[in-house]
Structure formats: structure tokens, C-alpha cells
Amino acid sequence: MHYPKQTKFRKYQKGFASGCKPEGSKLSFGKFGIKSLEATRVSSQVIEATRRTISRKLKRSGQIWVRVFADIPVSQKPAEVRMGKGKGQPSFWIARVQTGQLLFEMDGVSLQNAQQAAILASHKLGFRTKFVQWVEPLQIQKQ
């Protein structure tokens, strides 16, 4: 799964996801990618379900890079428990996703397959995403 084996503290404050992320907004590994258009929180189960959907659509050809990692535990108290008595136990893990952050990258597949996989992935994610493609930088001719 997509959560850490060990953390410094057992319980964290959830905080909120906001702002843009300039350093994680460019393709680094593959030719195609899925970029978020909203700031939100994504659980580790959603990340894994999306990864499986992409790999099944690509028929396990090519390569997939997961660029998000759920590293923040979210605690919940059991149902019908009275107020007080401290914070609940860690229940699941989330990743904070910022606007413009790349979530997944793909390589070794055709453009059409990558676009179809991105459409299926966006249905799993549940927030607005965008399909991005590597564009060769312009060559400046010396005169």
C-alpha cells in the first residue's frame, strides 16, 4: 500500500491542502501524466485503486510512476462514543494534493492508450484532473 512503514509521531494534525506546487508540476519520468486541477486530500485506497485502473487499461505494458504518497494518518473515534477522552486511533492515510501537482506518469504506451487510461483514472480520483503530454523543447538555431 501507499503509506509509510514508520513515522516519527503516531498522530498528526490533518491540516488542509491549498496553494500551487511549482516543483512537482513538470513531467520528470514519463511522456504522459495526470495533473490535479484542485487542492484536495486523497486517501491511500484511492491512490491504489487508480494505479490498478491505469495498469489494467495499459495491459501491464509500459511503466507507471506514482508521484503522490499518503503520509498523513487520519484518526477517527468509534461510532457512538461520548465526547472527550482524547483523540481517536489512526484509521486511514491521506496525501495532500495541491493544484498543479502531478499524480501519475506513464511511458512506453501510445498516446491513445494513455489518454484512455487518464480518463478512467480521473473517474476514480473524484476531483478535476488534466492529461499532460511531454513537449520537446524548441531548438534555437545559431546563425
Image (cartoon, rainbow, N blue to C red):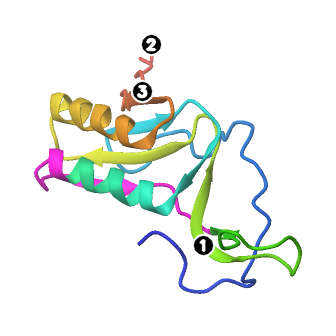
Name which of mark 3 and mark 1 comes first in the sequence: 1
Which residue appears at 65% of the width and 69% of the height? 79
Q: Which residue is mark 2?
A: 143
Given residues 127 and 86, the one toward you in this image is 86
Q: Which residue is mark 3?
A: 137
For the residue marked with disc 2, what is the amino acid?
Gln
Taking 126 as reference, is 15 above or below it? below
Q: Nearer the viewer, mark 2 or mark 1?
A: 1
Q: Which mark is residue 75?
A: none
Give the percent coordinates (x, y) of residue 25.
Answer: 56, 39
Give the percent coordinates (x, y) of residue 52.
Answer: 26, 56
On the picture, is 114 further left or further right than 43?
A: left
**Which stretch is magenta?**
56-71
Give the overall secondary structure of the magenta segment: loop
Q: Which residue is mark 1?
A: 91
For the residue marked with disc 1, what is the amino acid?
Ser
- Please say whether residue 61 is one of the residues in the magenta stretch: yes
Which quadrant of the figure has residue 33? top left
Q: Tell me the element at label 3.
A: loop
